[in-house]
């Protein structure tokens, strides 16, 4: 119920995001679009069917993390302020931000409407979910070396086969009922030896509170 579907301009498929309170959502900085072009779709499940649970709200402000590095995706984290408050119900709910960082081995849920095949394109119309483990920093750096910063973690399966993919960007990784990750980048999708890389939400709680308070 915290999953948000982001579109730009006239409903073009874009990214995922997560509701954290009735006026704010969290996404990835590489999903940046100017606020007047960005719409948030809440309560979505099947993108092709009007299910009666959806809320569409335009963005009022889009605030990427000031440290975001377009080259290495460091600080790939962004806040979106909604033009009007979301209405919370059984289909639309916020997710608490992580209070402490997750540990390797924690099982988490990643979700989105992204690509479902690793060669070619087959975007999901129903929201897809995947249960996946957080990997250790040494496993993560074993795959990506110095590309991994302290603001990232890896999650998924080193044998490949299951992963987040294009179109899932900005979406949630939820562990133990808290938002721990934002879908950020990776080498391909579900490639053996290359797990997904996620922005580490626990590093941003202070920035989130300060930014919300001043906007």
Image (spheres, helix red, strand yellow):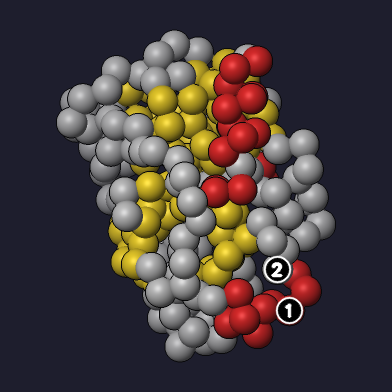
Number of the label disc, if any, that sits on residue 148: 2
In the displayed structure, would residue 194 be above or below residue 211?
Answer: below
Number of the label disc, if any, that sits on residue 145: 1
Mark 2 and mark 1: Cα distance apart in space: 6 Å
In the displayed structure, would residue 43 be above or below residue 87?
Answer: below
Say which residue appears at 69% left-offset and 61% top-offset: 150
Q: Residues within 10 Å of mark 2 (few under 14, many from 20)?
A: many
Tags 2 and 1 touching, CB below 8 Å: yes
Residue 89: x %, y % from top left: 21, 25
Q: Residues within 10 Å of mark 1 (few under 14, many from 20)?
A: few
Element type at mark 1: helix
> Front-most of 193 and 214?
214
The quadrant where residue 2 appears: top left
Number of the label disc, if any, that sits on residue 107: none
Say which residue appears at 46% left-offset and 46% top-offset: 98
Total numbered circles: 2
Q: Residue furthest top?
A: 84
Residue 163: x %, y % from top left: 44, 70
């Amino acid at each position: 119920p915290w999953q948000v579907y982001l579109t730009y301009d006239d409903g073009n498929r874009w990214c995922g995001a997560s509701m954290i309170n009735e006026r704010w959502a969290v996404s990835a900085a590489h999903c940046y679009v100017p606020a007047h072009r960005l719409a948030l779709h809440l309560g979505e499940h099947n993108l092709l069917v009007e299910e009666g649970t959806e809320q569409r709200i335009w963005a009022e402000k889009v605030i990427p993390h000031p440290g975001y590095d377009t080259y290495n995706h460091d600080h790939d984290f962004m806040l979106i302020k909604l033009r009007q408050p979301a209405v919370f119900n059984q289909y639309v709910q916020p997710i608490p931000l992580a209070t402490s960082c997750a540990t390797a081995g924690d099982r988490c849920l990643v979700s989105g409407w992204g690509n479902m095949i690793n060669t070619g394109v087959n975007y999901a119309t129903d929201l897809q979910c995947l249960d996946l483990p957080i990997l250790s920093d040494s496993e993560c750096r074993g795959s990506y070396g110095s590309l991994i910063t302290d603001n990232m973690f890896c999650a998924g399966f080193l044998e490949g086969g299951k992963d987040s993919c294009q179109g899932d960007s900005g979406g949630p990784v939820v562990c133990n009922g808290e938002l721990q990750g934002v879908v950020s980048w990776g080498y391909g999708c579900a490639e053996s030896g290359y797990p997904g890389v996620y922005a580490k939400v626990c590093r941003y709680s202070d920035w989130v509170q300060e930014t919300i308070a001043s906007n």
